[in-house]
Image (tube, rainbow, N blue to C red):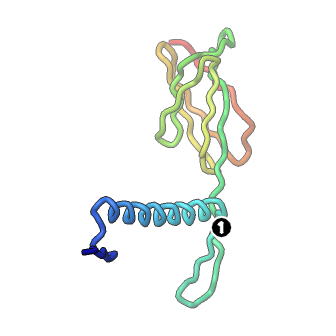
Amino acid sequence: MKQVRNNTTLPLHQKMNSIDTKMKTVLIFAAAILLSAAVFGNVTVENEANETESVSVVESVQLTGSIMDDKNNETLVGATVFVDGKKYYSDLDGNFCISDIKPGKHQIKVELISYQPAFVEIDANNYNGINIYLQQN
């Protein structure tokens, strides 16, 4: 006697492989949609009056500069740089580089042990780098 198997009675490991393959396909498709939305940046939105308007992604700028001692002009390593509530540090050369800053005016605060805090306001729209000088206590 020959037994015939239909597709509805597949072994469990074959059913799981089929489900895994379908899930991978769905995840790859979803990732492709998200990546394409991120790449193209401009989104068209329809409002209630069926008018379309273009919404553009806000550009960001990069803040760069150096932290220096005001008397001997030496760069200062490990100074804490605060911008928009976030904390950054100067590198081994006393430089800092902060990306993803929104255009506009920003208050920068710089602190380092045995130095007085420094406050600088910059306009990120017209910005070419800055040297911030700290005074020792």
Rendered residue at 30%/74% (across/down): 5
Q: Which residue is mark 1?
A: 42
**Residue 68, picture quadrant:** top right
In the rendered image, the vertical position of residue 18 relative to residue 124, given as above or below: below
Rendered residue at 62%/14% (across/down): 69
**Residue 67, picture quadrant:** top right
Q: Could you tell me residue 104's position as x and y percent?
A: 63, 50
Rendered residue at 60%/16% (across/down): 76
On screen, residue 5 versus residue 84, left or right, reads left
Count the labels in the image.
Answer: 1
- Label 1 crowding class (10 Å Cα cut-off): few <14, some 14-19, many 20+? few
Q: Which structural element holds mark 1? A: loop
Residue projecting furthest to the front: 1
Q: Could you tell me residue 83's position as x and y percent?
A: 53, 38
On screen, residue 60 versus residue 119, left or right, reads right
Q: Could you tell me residue 84's position as x and y percent?
A: 51, 43
Q: Identify which residue, 44 or 24, lies in the foreground.
A: 24
**Residue 58, picture quadrant:** bottom right
- Amino acid type at circle 1 is Asn
Rendered residue at 67%/29% (across/down): 65
Q: Could you tell me residue 134's position as x and y percent?
A: 59, 19
Residue projecting furthest to the bottom: 49
On screen, residue 26 versus residue 37, left or right, reads left
